[in-house]
Image (spheres, grey):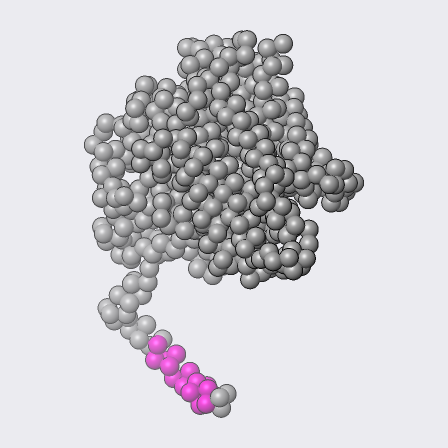
Amino acid sequence: MSDHNQKLFGRRTVLKFSATAAISALAAPAYLRQALASETIKLGCIMDETGPLSLEGKPMVQTTKLAVDELNAAGGLLGRQIEMISYDTQSTMQLYTQYAQRLALQDKVDVVHGGLTSASREAIRPIFGRAQIPYFYNTLYEGGVCDRNTFCTGTTPAQTVNHLVEHGLKNWGKKTYVLAADYNFGQITTDWVRKFMAAGGGSVVGADFFPLDATNFSSTISRIQSTAPDFVVTVLVGGAQTGFYQQWESAGMKSKIPLASNVFGLSNEINSMSPSTTDGIVTCYGWYPGIDTPASKSFVEKMEKQFGGDLTGMSELDVTTYDGIMFWAQAVKKAASLDREAVLAALESGLSYDGPGGAVSLDPATHHTIRSTYLGQPKDRKWQVMETFAHQSPNDSGGQCDLKANPRLNKQFTPVI
Amino acid sequence: MDLAGLIAFNVVTGIATLCLITIGLGVIYGMMRIINLAHGELMMLGAFTCIIATEAGINIWISIFVLSPLVVGIIGLVLERTIIRFLYGRILDTMLATWGMSIGLTGLIVTVFGNNVRTLANPAPSFGIGAYSTSLYGLVIVAVAVGALGSLFALLRLTKFGLILRATMERPGMAAALGIKPDTVYMATFALGSALAGMAGAVLAPISGVSPVMGVAYITRAFITVLGGGAAIVTGTGLASMLFGTIDELVSFKASPVIGSVAMLMTAVVLIRIFPTGITGRFLRRSL
């Protein structure tokens, strides 16, 4: 076998072949350039498409597909088609690091969009940082990530939680109670609530944290009643924790203490639960399916047309995913290259575009988006927008994160209480 | 005082919930020494049966107490005939097989109904304890748990079928020599355990979301309680639920839900260390 191989690929053959190749490359006929150009641009997607977090993750993968298909239909980028390489992390944390390594080392993708929970983001962010692959985290989160290689398009507490707290202080009272998922997202968001409450002259009278598979909330509902807050803020994540809203209603608490949340509604709760459970829960996001603008409507139509019955409720997560891909595409066009430095420089050049959620721009200093946010509540399985806040700045680091001035900064700013 | 009443109510409900999610597993483990890792998924199937039946217009109580146990009992029967019966006495193999079953059942339900959380309207109103209010559905859970333990006790103690069950459990060889088919008894036991799991899932459906992956949320607690309780099904499940349920609810109220779960696990570790065969392995050995 080895003899045969040697015969096939002898030194002379190889030399001859490379010489021919080199000469043809130098001569650079048009067909060859075409052949090189037909190599695809690789967009990596890493997301929980199945498992308990799939209610949030699957629509985000669908949006990624939609965005990539749209870009390809418009001729791709730099004359090349975009290939989406997608891995399903099955709501399992270990798979994140495995697949991230594979995207970085084996698939050698040009950009990565993905990561659902903040825990998963922190697991994969350093991997793409080391591999020098620009990374987009398109989920709303606790804010404060300051990393030159990372771009966060989702809303942050400085854009949403502050409005929820203001609404509560103005309409309900000075005392609140927080229920949150027990990992970095829930804990840091709770600290934000504490900070905003204190700034508004109120206080957090209690906070409970739950593991993602918590199903029994009776002891918490008793604790809430014994501290008698004016409103409750929920930062509960995942399928099991949606049980809280039902237990809250069946304990007769719904009519007594109002709820505000920056997570409720992201996993199709308004369709899966009865309106008597969901109506009136105040939320704050960068987009709602009911927003009455042409861009927003056409986004919903496009998603419905492409995925039809497979689509299970849309949310801000879909719009910010779409924004992330569009910003990246815009930067690649502007840089006219896929080179990381050129793309990062273009991304830091103050990009903006009109997305489904309105005008959005990418803040060069923080790598987060400046966008409109909205206060909304469900009524009869439809979102009602109550208030609009234009040009919300992702000012979670209090101006400390300036990646233009200090590109080597790589940390997450958390609220100081 | 009102608060004490509310907490007492929560503790009783917590104990009953634990009892309910454990009893089906307890029957299968106590009688057959099979560690059924698909227990959570059988509960999930019960919850799905209940939700589908209710959406089809069937009365919710009939769905919970008749349809769910029936459907899941039959599914259990089929699983026993096709998979479990070949693996009796091989504890590791049954664990692997039932684990596989649990993944398969989850996958099947995801494929058929999609990966979505569904909810069921709660049929019971809320009621007040002084200044506090809570769900009357807790009383339903307590009633079902007491009813299930009571009827299981009556079945084992008072009926001929119960006698046969107990005989097969203690000395399968001798029971076979007396003309009983252990094979049939095991089949019936597995179906009974499955039916109880299905009912538990259906009873809990109105207060928790129903999703194909809901089983994992219950399985750990059910296992701890079965192992803590030991071989006697009724007494063991009852005592272990009382111990763990009380600790979980009280510590959760005083500290936080996470600390509550930790306290419950710590108690279980200490308990198993002192009584490796569970509470009823040391005390009340002759009980059921």
Which residue corresponds to the image point at 54% horizontal and 15% vertical from the top-left?
A225
Q: Position of residue B132 (x, y in %)?
A: 53, 12
A417 or A205: nearer the eye? A205
Report the residue at 47% width, 46% height from top.
B73
Q: Say if the magenta span includes residue A14.
A: yes
Name the residue located 56 percent from the left edge and 48 percent from the top edge. Answer: B189
The answer to whether A10 is drawn above or below residue B4 in the figure is: below
**Residue A18 appears in view:** yes
Q: Quadrant of residue B231?
A: top right
Q: Residue at x 48, y 59 (%)?
A: B82
Q: Position of residue A138 (x, y in %)?
A: 41, 39
For the N terminus of chain B, the image quarter is top right
Q: Position of residue B98 (x, y in %)?
A: 54, 53
Task: Give B105 or B233, whichever is nearer the viewer.
Answer: B233
Quick check: can you spot residue A202?
no
The C terminus of chain B - image quarter: top right
User: Left of B155 or right of it: where is A66?
Assistant: left
Image coordinates of residue A233 in percent, x first then y, are: 48, 21
Magenta-colored stretch includes residue B63: no
Image position of A256 with respect to B150: above or below: above
Marker count (numbered): 0
Q: Nearer the viewer, residue A191 or B88?
A: B88
**Main SS of the magenta segment?**
helix
Give the magenta-colored segment's residue range. Answer: A4-21
